Image (spheres, grey):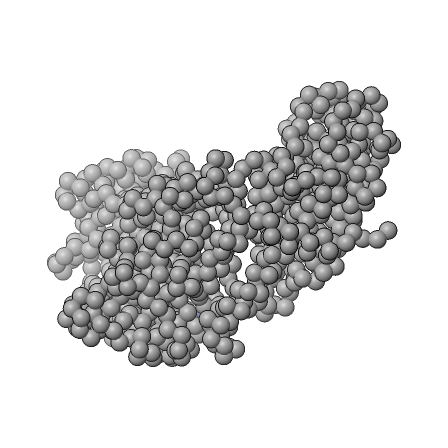
Amino acid sequence: MNNYPFAEIESKWRRKWEQGGLYTTNMQKTAKKCYCLVMFIYPSAEKMHIGQWYNYGPTDTWARFKRMQGYNVFEPIGYDAFGLPAENYAIKEGIHPALSTAENISFIREQLKVIGAMYDWSKEIDTSSPKYYRWTQWLFLQLYHQGLAYRKKAPVNWCPSCQTVLANEQVIEGRCERCDSEVTKRDLKQWFFKITDYAERLLEGLDRIDWPEKTKLMQRNWIGKSVGTEISFQLAGGGEPLTVFTTRPDTLYGATYMVLAPEHPLAEKLTVPSKRKESALYIEKTRRESEIERTSLNKEKTGVFTGSYAINSINGEKIPIWISDYVLLTYGTGAVMAVPAHDQRDYEFAQKFNLPIKWVIRPEGEELGDRGEAWVDSGIMFNSGEFNGLPSEEGGKRIVETLQKKGLAKPKVNFRLRDWLISRQRYWGAPIPIVYCERCGEVPVPESELPVELPFEVDFKPTGTGESPLTTSPTFVRTRCPRCGDQARREVDTMDTFICSSWYYLRYPNPNYNYGPFDPELVSKWLPVDQYVGGAEHAVMHLLYARFITKVLYDKGLINFDEPFLKLRHQGTITNAGARMSKSRGNVVRPEEYIADYGSDSFRMYLMFMGNYELGGEWDSSGINGVFRFLNRVYRLFNEKGGSQNDDFDLTSKEDKALWWRLNYTIKKCTQDLEGFHFNTAIASLMELINDLYRYSHPRNPLFGFCLLRLLLLLAPFAPYLSEELWHLSGGEDSIFRQRWPTYDPEALKEEEITVVIQVNGKLRSDIRVSPYIGEEELKESVLSDVKVKRHIEGKRIVKFVIVPKKLVNLVVR
Ligand SMILES: [Zn+2]
Ligand SMILES: [Zn+2]
């Protein structure tokens, strides 16, 4: 038997859909609106890889399902076109980034069209076009005028290879996220967005959105709220007291020394003359280390004694003040009270430098003794004067009260979140709309003068000095001051591309809107995004920034919602040879080779059939044949027997009833699974249905044609090209995607249930009610999800599944 002519079918429908405008969303029709969005694409030279296919194909299947359920679906796509990957490629190949990006976009657009998604091509956006970045600059100005964008000299992460600063989020274990070089520190004047002003609200909003718990947790940890106390320690030599932040005031009697961050303004002042040389060397050395290195638990502790002492505010003991890199200036106050008995880092430090370790908390009813490590849990206080015997929480509170009366403590909330560093010393980005004038200082470019265009004729390679390549363009740099008209210099840094992507979802409904960044009327109707799908690696970058910007715009009264993405799902990662696919590893799977052999529908369906969508898994091409065979079987059945809308039939034989049950069961299963992104099990149920149709012995019975056509409707979101073709072959009009998603008859599923008893290792453990027509795999699934069965097989391996049809299942476990 020949394979079905997928190439012909797919190119035909691609053309017809586009000509007929089938996927142009009517933006005025907002009843049952469904804004389904995938994270847009980097137009890199590597073109579209399997990871993007895995993001876009299945999401489109979900969107098509919603469309057939009667939703007015809006599914746009665009290009996140600025940024390092495009620029690094341009530098390597000597091609201007604007040209290579344009070329990559036109190539990727064709690749995207092959997927056969419902993208509304009239809504495409490209963040590197002046028409778009004019509004990215506008956004910068809004933050600037709100006091949320500011410039300051700060130690920043510097990638010596990319020659640019990096945001904290772009530093992975001390290395550059892009090129894996070791990141160092530099003091540079940089632009920041004050995301810290929104820390509390970024936390609160998480409770109102349907996102994977893991992602919410990552954001919560990244924001890192801790409620605690600021305690002041007097210095033995007099002067301003030293303030520390702690969440464990109950351990105060155990504070045996203090530690300052090397950058702490008092670090030098408190160092006695005899220690100055040693301390200066140490401080200089730590400047080259990343925060993650410094705070790593495994790192050998280092430090220097300042020669000065503080007074423990609760017991008056004189304790030494040290300097060490494991304390960060950017967290808390940059100084800590060290309690080696009850904090592991302090413990290691004390061990190394022979500092006293004083135990003050023990578990209830137990003694501690030297355990070789810190006891970090709360418990009962001892060695703590009048607070002895109190539980940690109560004792801690009392200590704070006592200190508060003396003015030595106050409640304090701390966040781990830092401001967002947004300036980049790179060419390929949106210029920051600021001008420096000798007379007026820092002056924002008026909105009417936007965009500040990125000049084309520039040596775009990094300058080697750390300055932006735009410095080398006199025509760009030299300008007039918008305020006084004098000669002035333009800001030469460009914006982090995460700003471009922090608001793009607002632009899609009307990407040609000229009076503002987005069409307020359409945005109020279509936003927030109903379903967002993209990689989990964006948890604390894009997904946090977009939430922040949404809240800023909400506060300005420009939008009427403050969370951009109501629902979020992450596609899993597809690995090859056990590793994430990458060009450098040489394990990239090209979608094109499979599409040429099996067609786009088979490839899309196989990606969904491979495993759980949110878990991903190892790429194994051997299974694609099975999916291809399934589509061929569907095609053959339609060609030989044909589907029909005729529902005038009776269920007479046992066989009829079994098929009718199967159809209704499949509709129910497919609907539920699609709703929850469980594509693989939905496809498995379609395969069961086709098996039953092949087995059915009266294909002339109208029931058969009816079931076959229902199968096609269920298949449509998974294999859009083939389904459209077969719809027309069966005399269908218009498009299958304008048909209604089938619903099932609950009565058909209840009828004639039977009891199957379940044994585990020969012992009766449970029983379940199932349909007599249930397939073996479905039966196994039902058995394994039975609560009583679960209890008896927990932690054991299933060796054998014995099935006596319609009666009994015995599980052999070990
Ligand atoms: Zn780098
Ligand atoms: Zn001026």
Residue at figure coordinates x 64%, y 65% from the top left:
587
Q: Is residue 501 above or below residue 583?
A: above
Q: Is residue 731 above or below residue 575?
A: above
Q: Residue furthest left?
A: 238
> Is residue 224 toward the left or the right of residue 629 in the image?
left
The picture places residue 765, in percent across and down from the top left corner, at 71, 25
Residue at figure coordinates x 25%, y 45% from the top left:
412
Q: Nearer the viewer, residue 107 or 664?
A: 107
The picture places residue 93, in percent across and down from the top left corner, at 52, 77
Res. 610 visible in picture = no
The picture places residue 166, in percent across and down from the top left corner, at 39, 65
Q: Nearer the viewer, residue 670 or 312?
A: 670
Residue at figure coordinates x 74%, y 59% from the top left:
597
For the image, the number of numbered tags is 0
Res. 470 visible in picture = yes
The picture places residue 757, in percent across and down from the top left corner, at 75, 24
> Is residue 561 toward the left or the right of residue 399 in the image?
right
Residue at figure coordinates x 46%, y 57% from the top left:
125
Q: Nearer the viewer, residue 113 or 198?
A: 113
Q: Quadrant of residue 326?
A: bottom left
Q: Nearer the viewer, residue 644 or 746?
A: 644
> Is residue 187 toward the left or the right of residue 271 in the image?
right
Q: Quadrant of residue 361?
A: top left
Q: In which quadrant will I find the C terminus?
A: top right
